[in-house]
């Protein structure tokens, strides 16, 4: 296939790209720029005072608790990525290879769970994780001591909620990668004497990387903005960045501070993603290098 | 301050989600929805006057708004607030030009004065309304005054103190906030994450009056008391239902920072063993806090009579009674004539037999000069938890 080289002088290309470019500039770049500008303003008596001041950035860089929360947010997001991928991969693999008969029904169930409002799902976990909730009731009837689990209002509770609410994303991205793997490649590996285990690690897993990476990126980005789970299931034990930002905007009515913390969160997330992308590209290049 | 779980903005009046959905149910399918929307728009346009009203949940009940709309041939558009500070910030950012009235927590109504968008109330015009209020709320009413002028009228009130399940604890145990810091109550306390509400009572327990100008030493005391409270606290929750559930099943032995706002609706539903009390004064410092919601007029250049009429309407005995007993929360009202309209059960739910005891032992929740410092300390200590 011949790939035509396109240039910005090509009117068709410009006409094709222009609508998206306009949308991105108007609804992403301009708000981002406005947020950045806001960080240099100050507030006086709950009103924004238009000035150019580094006061907010001085506060952000001089108060360690902002960074404690940012670090906690990134850590929680990374743990959430690992857990969701670990859960999603076997589910997606089973859907693609072992449960073909019930594939549609299972997919519909996952989609239903995915589309159910996150507020409902998160509050539902309270009934399960509470000291006198369903989980402890079940354990007690299985012979375990009463109130054995104490997960509600803990960071673990927050993590359970985050993983549950986000696991559908990697399930679908990984599934889509798995079903696109050419079956002949797997059979060729078997023919060449590879075990199922080796075939999985040398053929299936590498070829499912695009889905795995895209699922991981989705979960990471959404985890960085997790708000409901720490608020409802964390009970103040694991405040994350989004709550800090909400408090700054709403409760403290300090919009420049909220904007600065938003910029810190976006930058942190973008840098993390860039680092992961560089790592993934290097790894792909290494894998493709001829022997 | 953030209270409860009200989290939607709606437009009550001719065009709102409920009326559109109702129309859909009646006529069926999208065509009917479009038709009802069109008719609704026509009705809205046909109304002689319109009001833009920013308020807490409860003030927007159709049973409150519809009679006024009918009698005045007016349409009222509602913007529900979820956070008093956020609502004020919206007005301060320029929305004051769009709104006619606001019902919010009293410090934020009072702040409209210095912010420059308050339409002050002529107390003489509201003499009949003030005459119906309990003496404690009559003009001149200091908590809502700015430079001697009234910024609004009080509409609902209550007190903040420990909310206790008396099945588990005696009320005498909570004659002080000491159990919040007692290891015997470790992981049995719930703080309500409602802005400054949980901070103020804990500051009072530390011997600091948060409604006065605080120096660094006093702020350090606030920090220490919050840190100590966090150590013993099981959860800091923002959702009222979660806090109430824990209180009923005993997983929380006390809620701090909610007071009657968290209690009365439960008592109304039969949980009369849940009570909000006010601790005894400590070292001469009253430990309870009286919170109050108020309704103020906004100086938006329009300043028509209908806005003042609505203010008179919302504090009238019949409407005040409806405002007191809502689906989500139940609260006291300043109109003394409304008292006769409450049933015995409602009076009991509202703890009316205790209200003046609470009043006498409480500070009034006004503008705290160092509120941002205290909120910053709350954030810092929460991060370190």
Image: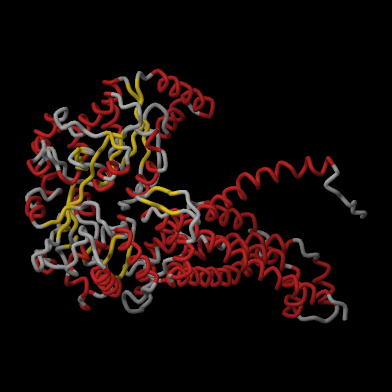
Q: Quadrant of residue A104?
A: bottom right
Q: Observer-nearest residue: A60 or B88?
A: A60
Residue A134 visible to the viewer: no
Residue drawn at 22 percent across, 49 percent down = B265
Question: If the image is split into quadrants, where does the N terminus of chain A sit?
Answer: bottom right
Color theme of the render: secondary structure
Determine whether, in the image, residue A52 is placed left or right of residue B253: right
Q: Quadrant of residue B42?
A: top left
- Relative to A132, residue A144 above or below: below
- Outermost residue toward the right in this view: A2
Percent position of residue B127, x then y: 12, 30
Percent position of residue B17, x then y: 43, 34
In this rendering, the count of numbered labels is 0
Residue drawn at 43 percent across, 70 percent down = A63
Q: Observer-nearest residue: B206 or A5?
A: B206
Percent position of residue A170, x then y: 62, 63
């Amino acid at each position: 296939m011949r790939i035509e080289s396109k240039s910005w002088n090509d009117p068709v290309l410009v006409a094709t790209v222009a609508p998206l470019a306009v949308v991105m500039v108007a609804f992403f770049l301009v708000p981002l720029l406005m947020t950045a500008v806001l960080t240099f303003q100050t507030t006086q008596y709950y009103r924004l005072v238009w000035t150019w001041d580094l006061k907010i950035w001085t506060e952000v860089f001089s108060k360690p608790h902002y960074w404690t929360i940012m670090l906690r947010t990134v850590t929680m997001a990374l743990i959430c990525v690992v857990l969701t991928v670990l859960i999603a991969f076997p589910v997606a693999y089973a859907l693609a290879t072992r449960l073909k008969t019930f594939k549609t029904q299972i997919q519909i169930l996952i989609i239903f769970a995915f589309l159910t409002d996150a507020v409902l799902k998160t509050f539902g976990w309270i009934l399960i994780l509470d000291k006198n909730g369903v989980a402890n009731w079940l354990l007690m009837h299985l012979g375990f001591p009463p109130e054995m689990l104490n997960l509600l209002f803990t960071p673990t509770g927050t993590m359970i909620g985050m993983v549950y609410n986000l696991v559908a994303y990697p399930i679908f991205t990984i599934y889509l990668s798995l079903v696109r793997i050419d079956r002949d490649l797997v059979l060729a590996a078997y023919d060449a004497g590879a075990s199922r285990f080796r075939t999985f690690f040398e053929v299936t897993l590498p070829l499912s990387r695009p889905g795995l990476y895209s699922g991981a990126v989705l979960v990471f980005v959404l985890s960085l903005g997790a708000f409901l789970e720490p608020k409802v299931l964390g009970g103040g034990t694991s405040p994350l960045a989004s709550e800090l930002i909400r408090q700054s905007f709403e409760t403290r009515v300090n919009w420049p501070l909220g904007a600065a913390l938003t910029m810190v969160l976006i930058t942190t997330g973008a840098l993390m993603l860039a680092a992961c992308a560089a790592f993934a590209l290097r790894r792909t290049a290494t894998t493709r290098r001829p022997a | 301050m953030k209270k409860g779980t009200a989290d939607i903005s709606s437009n009550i009046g001719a065009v709102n989600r409920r009326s559109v959905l109702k129309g859909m149910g009646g006529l069926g399918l999208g065509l009917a929805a479009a038709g009802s929307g069109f008719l609704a728009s026509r009705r809205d346009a046909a109304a002689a006057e319109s009001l833009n009203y920013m308020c807490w949940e409860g003030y927007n009940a159709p049973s409150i708004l519809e009679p006024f709309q009918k009698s005045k041939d007016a349409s009222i558009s509602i913007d529900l607030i979820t956070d008093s500070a956020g609502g004020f910030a919206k007005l301060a950012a320029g929305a004051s030009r769009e709104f006619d009235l606001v019902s919010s927590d009293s410090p934020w109504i009072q702040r409209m004065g210095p912010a420059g968008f308050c339409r002050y109330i002529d107390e003489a015009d509201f003499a009949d309304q003030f005459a119906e209020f309990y003496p404690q709320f009559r003009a001149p009413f200091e908590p809502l005054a700015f430079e001697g002028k009234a910024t609004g009228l009080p509409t609902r009130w209550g007190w903040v103190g420990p909310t206790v399940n008396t099945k588990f604890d005696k009320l005498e145990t909570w004659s002080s906030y000491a159990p919040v810091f007692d290891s015997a109550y470790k992981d049995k306390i719930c703080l309500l994450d409602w802005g400054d509400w949980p901070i103020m009572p804990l500051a009072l327990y530390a011997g600091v009056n948060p409604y006065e100008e605080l120096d660094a030493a006093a702020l350090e005391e606030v920090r220490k008391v919050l840190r100590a409270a966090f150590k013993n606290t099981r959860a800091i929750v923002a959702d009222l239902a979660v806090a109430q559930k824990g209180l009923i099943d005993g997983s929380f032995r006390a809620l701090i920072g909610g007071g009657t706002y968290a209690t009365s609706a439960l008592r109304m539903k039969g949980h009369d063993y849940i009570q909000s009390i006010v601790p005894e004064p400590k070292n001469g410092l009253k430990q309870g806090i009286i919170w109050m919601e108020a309704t103020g007029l906004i100086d938006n250049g329009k300043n028509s009579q209908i806005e003042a009429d609505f203010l008179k309407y919302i504090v009238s005995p019949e409407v005040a009674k409806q405002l007191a007993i809502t689906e989500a929360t139940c609260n006291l009202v300043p109109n003394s004539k409304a008292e006769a309209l409450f049933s015995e059960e409602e009076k009991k739910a509202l703890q009316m037999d205790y209200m003046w005891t609470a009043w006498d032992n409480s500070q009034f929740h006004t503008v705290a000069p160092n509120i941002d410092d205290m909120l910053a300390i709350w954030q810092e200590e929460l991060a370190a938890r």
